[in-house]
Every structure is written in C-alpha cells, then in structure tokens.
C-alpha cells in the first residue's frame, strides 16, 4: 500500500515502540488464523455481495469510509473498501486488531482523545482517522476474523441505535462468510471438502517452496465401505465416515491438512515430515480405525488403503499431479489386498 512521507515517519516511530499501546493477540489466535485462511479469501478479487454491504453501510451511516477488514498475522487486509485506495495496512497500527478483542463493537468517537490511538500514524497522517466504529465479524466457531468498520475524518458521536444497526450490517457479512464456508466444507464430517482442500493445499505447497520444506500427500480410500452401506444401511456408513474424520483429527498433527474428497475418499497433506514419522501416523490411524466400536457383529473389518506421493521444493509438481500419483498408489495397494 502507499503511505505518504508523513505517515511513514509516524509509522516508524510507532513500530519502534514510541506509541502507547499495540493491539494484543486474541487467546485463540492460532485457531482464528487457521479458520481465516481456510476460507481462501485473503488477497482474493472483490465480490459484489461484500461490496454492496460496504456501499450500503457507508450511505446509511453517512461516513466517508467503510471497510470489511480481515486480520491476518501481520496485516489487516480489506475484502471490501469504500473511500480508501489501499488494500491493507500493518496489523500493529490497525484499529480493527483492537476491535476483534471484544465481542461488542469498538467505538472511538475521537481518536485524538483515546490513549490507544492518539499517536497512531493513521490518525496523525492519511487517512486522518478521528471517528472509528468496528463490529467484529464472528464465525460460527466463535473466531473473530475481522470487522465491518466505519471511519470518519471528523469526531462524531455514535448512538445505541446506530450501534445496533452496525451489528445488523455485520451479521449480513457473517452470513456471507457462512455461505462461503459451506461451499468449502463437507456437510457430514465437517472436514474441508475437495474445493476447500485444493484451495488451502495450494497455499501449503507454495509455503513449502518458499521455506524449502518437503511434503507428503496421502490418498486414503476406506475398505469395504460399499458392503457397509449395502448390509447395514447408509446411516451406518455415515457413522463410519464421521468416526474416521474424528480419528484424522486425533491422529494427525495440528498443522496437518486433511479433508474428505468424496464418498469414502480422504486425503492428508503432511508438511515438514519424514517417511518414518509419516508411517507412524498412518499406522496409528489404521490401528485406531480397526478398533472403532461398531455394530457390524464382526462381519466387516474396518480398514483402509492408502498411497503416498512426495513433494520436493527442489522439483515441485502441481497438486493435481500429487493427487494423481497418490491415488494410483492407493489403488495399487487395494488391488494387492484383493489378490491375497
């Protein structure tokens, strides 16, 4: 983004510790960031649904600036913005990074009279913030990923009625994100679906290239799943799928990415993991799955087949290629089982 010389000078002073208060990190910061990034919305194109909301809010509250701001690790990025030519600012100087610490809207009627913001470069220079009102955008999980905020160059009061109206506008933004999450989440297991996995996995592989990390993609297909559906019904099959999704969460590391691609097919993307560690996790997953309580009366053995494809930062390949290789190796293992 562009800063004037005056703003740059104040920003340097701020980041050197001369400002009074920087925003704290939420207690659930890691989970908050993971859910934000799982939306695959950061650095995305503008969307009419969000732009309509900021335009309407700007007109309704008669403010020069209205923003849907998402708080990433070191920046706030604007999903939609009316009245500013920039797309992001540093998180350290962000009013919205303060706002996500609270359940209710944060209202600053005059930033020059607020110890947290009186020396903020966005107050001392462009865009000369005096009034700020930001309502947290809260997902169903409770994670606050950003705000819908109003900004004015002049101090102003903000009534209880206006605060309620801002909350209503933010609820519309939250519904848009809820719709977005449904499009990337498997309804049965609540794991990422194929679309959600592909979007996030591509970011993971880009990170591996930048950080010189290796990765492993594991393609999983549950054995005997059709038999379970045929003999015991689809409700029993659904229980197996949900139970297996729970095992993935328990057996994998927090940084691992796993998803339900379709039917009884699942996938895991491991980063910065050697072959021995990968084998340990997969054996633990196999053992846990085989010991799941069930009502199949020992007629069906719970197991799965899997194939592994390796990703190297030195010779990177596409995610599509990784999926194809791992899928082929999984089917080769399944064929060997049937041949025994």
Image (tube, rainbow, N blue to C red):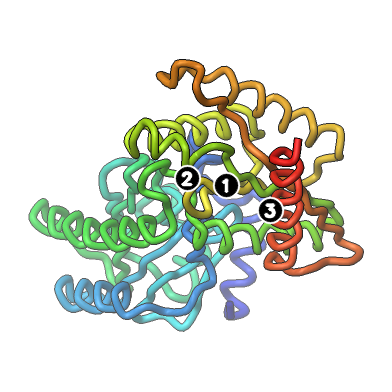
Q: Residue at x 67, y 40 (%)?
A: 305
Neighbours of disc 1 within 10 Å: few (<14), some (14-19), many (20+): many
Element on which disc 3 rests: helix
Rounded to the nearest angstrom, the CA distance separating label 2 from label 1 is: 10 Å
- The image shows residue 33, relative to residue 131, as above or below, that is above
Residue 223 position by quadrant: top right
Relative image position of residue 7 (x, y in whole percent): 57, 72
Q: Of the residues under marks 3 and 2, which one precedes in the sequence?
A: 3
286 relative position to 261: left or right: right
Q: Of the residues under marks 2 and 1, which one precedes in the sequence?
A: 2
Q: Of the residues under marks 1 and 3, which one precedes in the sequence?
A: 3
Relative image position of residue 256 (x, y in whole percent): 65, 42
Labelled disc at residue 191: 2
Residue 36 seen from this side: no
Q: Residue at x 58, y 62 (%)?
A: 198
- The image shows residue 69, relative to residue 244, as above or below, that is below
Neighbours of disc 2 within 10 Å: few (<14), some (14-19), many (20+): many
Q: Can you tell which of label 2 and label 1 is closer to the viewer?
A: 1
């Amino acid at each position: 983004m562009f800063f004037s010389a005056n703003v740059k000078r104040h920003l340097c002073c701020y980041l050197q510790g001369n400002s009074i208060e920087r925003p704290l990190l939420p207690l659930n910061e890691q989970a908050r960031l993971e859910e934000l990034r799982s939306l695959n919305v950061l650095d995305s194109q503008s969307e009419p649904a969000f732009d309509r909301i900021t335009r309407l809010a700007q007109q309704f509250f008669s403010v020069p600036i209205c923003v849907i701001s998402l708080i990433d690790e070191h920046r706030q990025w604007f999903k939609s913005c009316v009245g500013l030519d920039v797309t992001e600012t540093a998180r350290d100087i962000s009013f919205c990074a303060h706002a996500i610490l609270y359940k209710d809207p944060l209202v600053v009627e005059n930033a020059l009279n607020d110890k947290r913001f009186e020396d903020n470069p966005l107050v001392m220079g462009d865009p000369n913030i005096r009034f700020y009102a930001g309502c947290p955008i809260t997902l169903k999980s409770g994670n606050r990923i950003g705000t819908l905020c109003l900004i004015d160059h002049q101090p102003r009061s903000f009534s209880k009625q206006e605060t309620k109206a801002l909350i209503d506008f933010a609820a519309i933004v939250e519904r848009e994100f809820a719709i977005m999450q449904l499009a990337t989440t498997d309804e049965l297991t609540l794991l990422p679906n194929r679309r959600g996995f592909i979007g996030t996995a591509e970011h993971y592989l880009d990170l591996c290239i930048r950080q010189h990390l290796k990765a492993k993609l594991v393609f999983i297909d549950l054995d005997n799943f059709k038999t379970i559906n045929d003999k015991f019904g689809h409700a029993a099959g659904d229980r197996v799928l949900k139970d297996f999704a729970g095992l993935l969460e328990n057996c994998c590391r927090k940084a691992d990415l796993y998803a339900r691609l379709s039917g009884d097919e699942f996938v895991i993307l491991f980063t910065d993991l050697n072959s021995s560690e990968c084998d340990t996790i997969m054996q633990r997953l196999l053992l846990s799955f085989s010991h799941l309580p069930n009502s199949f009366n020992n007629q069906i053995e719970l197991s799965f087949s899997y194939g592994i494809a390796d990703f190297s930062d030195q010779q990177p390949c596409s995610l599509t290629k990784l999926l194809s290789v791992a899928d082929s190796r999984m089917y080769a293992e399944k064929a060997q089982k049937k041949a025994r």
